[in-house]
Image (cartoon, rainbow, N blue to C red):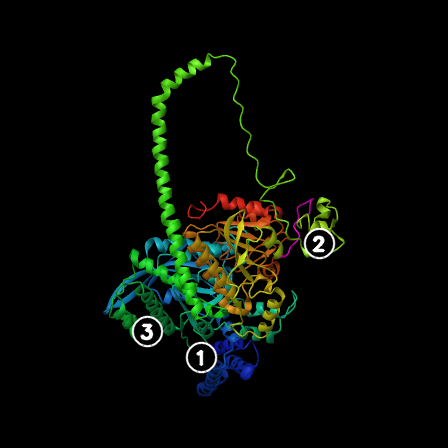
Amino acid sequence: MNEQLKQLHKIDERINYLLQIKDFSNWGNLDGFKSTCDRLKQTVYDHTVEELSGEIRKLHESISFLEERAEEQLTPMERVRIVRSAQRFSLKDILENVYEDYTELGGEGDANIDPAMICAKATIVRRIRNKPYTASVMVIGQETGHGEEFRNGGSCRPEGNAKAKRFMKVAETEGIPIHFYIFTPGSYPVEEYPGAAQQIARNIYAMTKLRVPMISLISEGGSGGAEAIGLSDYRLMVTHGYYSVISPEGAAAIEGQIREGSKVPKELIEVCADRLRLTAFDNLKNGTIDRIIHEPPLGARRDDFNFFATLRSEMLRATDQVVLSTKSFRAFRAREIGRKKNTAEAQELQVEVPWDLNRDEVRRLLAQRSKKYLSLARHGFTGTPGTGAHLAHQTWTGVEKVYYTLRYDILKNQKRQVHKVIKDVSGEGSVMLKRISEPFHAVVNFWSDKKKGRKPVPRLAAPPIPGQDNGRIIDPLELTDTYTSPLANEDRTVTCPNAARYGCKDLWIPDLYGEFAGVCETCGHHFPLEHQWYLKNIFDPRSIKFFNNEITSGNPLEYTGFTERLAVSKKKTGRNSGNMTFHAQVNGIHIIVAMLYSDFRNGTVGAAEGEKFVQACQLAKRKKRPFLAYIHTTGGIRIQEGTLGVVQMPKCTMAVREYIDAGGLYIVVYDNNSYAGPVASFLGCSPYQFAIRSSRVGFAGPRVIRETTGVDIPPDYHSARNALKRGHIQGIWDRREFRRNLHKALLTMGSPSLYYR
C-alpha cells in the first residue's frame, strides 16, 4: 500500500501542476480527477491492492492524455505559468546537477548580499578524446528558489546586480568563461544608491567589453532585470521559457487602461501574452536569441536529470563555439562541433578547444560581440536606403573615416606632440636663460631703483567684445529668442504648484511662457515646455540639420491596433520616429544630438529609435564631435515591439561604450519624465548626466513601485534633487541656463580627442 500511496501523491502533484498551468480552471475535468485522487488517498486502506492499482492506472492514463494535449496546445501565457511554477528548476538545481563542484561567492542563503542573485565559482568536466579535463567557470544568475521568501522570486535589488558585476570582473581577471542564468520577472525598483536603473546600466556597460567568453541561458527573462546579466556572446533559451519587455499582466494593465487596484481581466492578459511574442520560438525568429534548448513536455522540473545532462552538453558546446570563433585556425574543429551538436557525443569531443584566449583572440571576441549587438533588430523598422544609396552611404562613410582619422588622430596628434616637445624645450631653455641673466637683471634693477619720480606705465583697456546693440554688449550664450511657445497665447494666469510653500504670485501666462521661459520667478519651478522650444532656443540659429529622417518606426510583431496608433503619431508630429537626430552648434561648437520627445509615443524607444541613436553615436565618433542625448521625455521601451525593443538597451549601450572609449564626450540631459529601460542602459551609463530642474528621473513609476513593493513612495521620490542626492545625476540645470551650462560642459569636459581641443 505504501507504494500505491506514493503513486497517488505523484499523480496529485501532476494534477496540481496542470491546474496551475490552466489557471485552476476545470479544463479536461481536472477538478474531477483531483477529487478522485483525494478520495483514493483518504480511503487507500479500504481497497485491495488490485483494486487500488487499477484505479491508479486509470488516473495515470487520463492525466498522461491531458498532459499530451496540454503540451500540444500550450498558449504563451501557459508557458509563463510553467516558468513561475514552484516545481520549475532553479539555478541552485543547475549548480548541483550540471557542474561538478561550486563555491558560492558573497555569502550563502539568506545571509547573502541579495540572495536573489547567486555568483559561484564552479568547475565542469569536459571530455576530450575520452579524457576528462576540468575547467573553471564563473556562474552568475538569479535564484527564484522553491518558496524561500528571502529570494524575492529572482527579483534582484541593485546590490545584487552590483555583486554580479563585481564577479564578472573577477572572471575577467582570471580569464575564465562566464555562464549567465536568467530567472527573473524583473529588477526590484529601488532608487536609493546604487539605484536599480543605474546599476543595470553599469552592468550592461561593463559587459560590452568583458574580455572573456559569455554564455547566457534564459528561462524567465523580464525586461531590464534580464538585461542586467543578459548581454553575452551566445544566448540560449529553453523551450518553455519566456523573454519579454514586460509581464503580460503589466501589458494588459497598460493596454486596458486599468485603474490601480482594479482587477485585470484574464482574457486581456492572455491576449497580451500572445501579442508580446515572448516565447522561445518567437525570440529565435526575431533574432534576439541564438539557439533553443528543448525541454521535456510541460517544462523541465527540479528532478529532470536527463534535462540537466542536455543542458550541460549545450553549455559546453556553446562555450566551445564562442571560443572557437576567435581562433585563427578553426574550420575542421567548427565542423566537428557542429556535427555533434544534436547528439549525446557532444559531451565527448575529439578536438581540443582551449578556453583561454590570447590578445588577438580577445580582440576578435570583442569585435564579434560588437557586430552582433549593433546589428540586432534591423528588421524592426523601415526606411533604410536602397542598394545604390546604401553603397554610396558606405563609400562616403569610409571616406569620412579616413579623412577624420588622418586629420585628428594622426596630423593633430603629431602637431600636439611637436607642441609638447617645443614647450618642454622652451621651458628648460627659459630656466637656463634665467640663471644666466639673473646677475645682469640685478644690476639693471639696482640702477633703476635709484631713479626718482618715475610714473607707472598705463595699461591698455581690454578690447571691446564684438556684437553690440546700442552700446549693450550681447552675450552669445544667452538663450536665443527666435521662438516663443504657443502656450504664451492664452490671456490668463496660472498658479505655481509651490505657491503655498513659497508664496509664489499668480503668473500671467504670456509672461510665464514668453520672457520667463516657463520658470516661476519666485521659486524656480519649471513648467513643461514643448520640444520645439529647445530646438529653437538652445542651439545656434539655423545650425540644426536633421539626418536619418527616413528611418521609420514600424510594427514588426504585428501588434493588434498598433499600426493605426503609429500612423496617428506620425501625422501629429510630421516625423517617423520618437528620436530626432541632428547636427547642431552651441556658440560655434559642432555637436551631434539625439532627442527623445514626448509627442511621439511618449518618447518610448523601439527598433527605429535605437538604430538612429546608434548611427548618431557612430557619426559623433567618426567626426570627433561631442554627443548630446537630450531626453525631453521617455516612457521607456516600447512594449508593442517586445524584445526587439528590449535589445535596444544592450545595442545602444554598445555604441555608447565604443564612442566613449574612442575619446568622445557623451552628455545626457533629462527633462520632464524619464523612466525605465533607456535610463537603465544607454542613458544611465553616461559619466555626465544632468537634469533640468523640476524633472523626474527613475527606473519605475510610483504605481509600479507600489504594486511591486507594497510601499507608498513620497511625491518627490523621483525628483531631480533626490536623483542628485543619490548620485544618479551630476548636476541640476536651470532651463534658462541650459545653453550656458551646455557650452561650459563642452569646453571643460571630454578628452583631447575632440575636434576642437
Q: Which residue position is annotated with label 2?
A: 488
Instruction: Report how far apart the C-alphas of labels 3 and 2 lie in the structure.
Output: 67 Å
Nearest to N terminus: mark 3 or mark 1: 1
- The residue beneath circle 1 is 7
Q: Earlier in the sequence, mark 3 or mark 2?
A: 3
Q: Position of residue 224 (x, y in %)?
A: 50, 61
Q: Main secondary structure of the magenta part?
A: loop
Nearer to us in this view, 392 or 653: 392
Task: Determine crowd level at label 3: few under 14, some 14-19, many 20+ residues with C-alpha closer than 10 A.
Answer: some
Q: Amino acid at mark 3?
A: Lys
The residue that mark 3 highlights is 341
Residue 564 makes an appearance in the image: yes
SS for callout 3 = loop
Q: Is residue 529 magenta?
A: yes
Which of 697 and 98 lies nearest the eye of the viewer? 697
* First in sequence: mark 1 vs mark 2: 1
Q: On screen, 447 above or below 222?
A: above
**Which stretch did the figure color magenta?**
520-530
Q: CA distance from mark 1 to mark 2?
A: 77 Å
* Residue 148 in sight in this render: no
What's the amino acid at mark 1? Gln
Q: Are marks 3 and 2 in contact (CB under 8 Å)?
A: no
Q: Amino acid at mark 2?
A: Ala
Q: Position of residue 207 (x, y in %)?
A: 41, 57
- Judging depth in this view, the residue of 688 and 405 nearest the camera is 405
Q: Which mark is residue 101?
A: none
Please say if the residues under marks 3 and 1 sit with CB atoms less than 8 Å apart.
Answer: no
- Element assignment for label 2: helix
